[in-house]
Amino acid sequence: MLIKHKSPSDVRSSEITPREMFFDRRSLLKGAAGLSGGVLLGALPFPGGARAGAMLPDVAESLYKVDETPTPFEHVTGYNNFYEFGTGKEDPAENARKFNPKPWSVVIDGEVEKAARYDLEDLISPHRLEERTYRFRCVEAWSMVVPWVGVPLADVIKRLGPTSRAKYVAFETLLDPDRMPGQRRALLDWPYLEGLRMDEAMNPLSLLVVGLYGEVLPNQNGAPVRLMVPWKYGFKAIKSIVRMSFTETMPPTSWNRSSPHEYGFYANVNPQVSHPRWSQARERRIGDSFFSPKRETLMFNGYGEEVAGLYAGMDLARNY
Ligand code: MTE
């Protein structure tokens, strides 16, 4: 996600350096530090860091697993978009360090029988945790492969009992500028909002994520609960969710509200529909060598067999 009107001082090195170069440069620097007796090493803390989080118990293997090498943990957790914690790619890992996502509750309201405020534990624990290795395609034309841990969104929704009038699910991130310093700047109209059509939310691929790489979800990746809809651009994957509302009408979404000509409600990965400022035909897989060619972006991020039917008859160039 890119903000259009930035002063040069706002642009971090991680935003202007291609991502693999950025990581290569870090490993080069780390390597150099090692050679020079580790003097530099302490001065270059990697914000994603080593795996240190609590492991999630009883995670079932899932059939949903792309046969591709997962992106290294330190990249997945060290290079993030989470504007509540800053606009630089390293900011979330740094600035979300002290964020405490416990206790956490989620308000369920709107067109639903069991409307209430639920402890996150009560919302998640009736369901089996699964690990699903999904491709993840950011609108900024880079991609990753991540072993997410979560529960099918459809299972959670079924238990809540949406009424027949529920056509959409709206999601909302926590609003708390004291704990989320990025919200002190009016980059977006906070809180961050997202939404899915009901049939998208009920698709078996849609996942409510509470972990990655077997661990409790790191703060910078959207602790304690975020969405993952692998056939859509990454900005649909709303983090740190505090509300799910069932609505009759299409809910507003943050990026659509902020730049309607750039970001639509659907945001399906579509190599044929360019972003107004860049092509979406190809992507850089994080972890690939900087010199290896970009990969072709796949329609629906490669999940067409599972989701193309949801959009039958729709003009996807108009409904982007
Ligand atoms: N959710 C909130 N609340 N705030 C954000 O800034 N960024 C989105 C999405 N969810 C964002 C968010 C974007 S643009 C992307 S690409 C993904 O989170 C990044 O997810 P990741 O940090 O796990 O890679």
Image: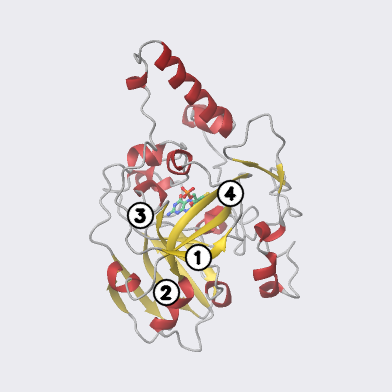
Give the residue displayed 52% in from the left and 67% down from the top.
Answer: 206
Point out the tag, 1 or 3, that comes first from the N-terminus.
1
Query: What amino acid type should be assigned to the residue bearing mark 1?
Result: Ser
Q: Is mark 3 within 8 Å of ligand 1?
A: no
User: Residues under labels 2 and 1: Cα distance?
Assistant: 28 Å
- Tags 4 and 3 in contact by the CB under 8 Å rule? no
List the single residue furthest toward the left.
103
- Can residue 7 be spotted in the picture? no
Q: Is 190 left, or right, of 302 in this rendering?
A: left
Give the residue displayed 47% in from the left and 31% down from the top.
Answer: 10
Residue 305 picture location, percent across and down: 69, 68
The quadrant of the picture occupied by the C terminus is bottom right
Q: Which numbered disc, 1 or 4, marks the residue closer to the eye? A: 1
Q: Is mark 4 within 8 Å of ligand 1?
A: yes
Between 70 and 120, the one lying in front of the other is 70
- Can residue 80 be spotted in the picture? yes
User: Residues under labels 1 and 3: Cα distance?
Assistant: 22 Å
- Tags 4 and 2 in contact by the CB under 8 Å rule? no
Helix, strand or loop at label 2? It is strand
User: Residues under labels 4 and 2: Cα distance?
Assistant: 25 Å
Quadrant for residue 287, please give it.
top right
Which labelled disc corresponds to residue 138? 4
Residue corresponding to mark 1 = 62
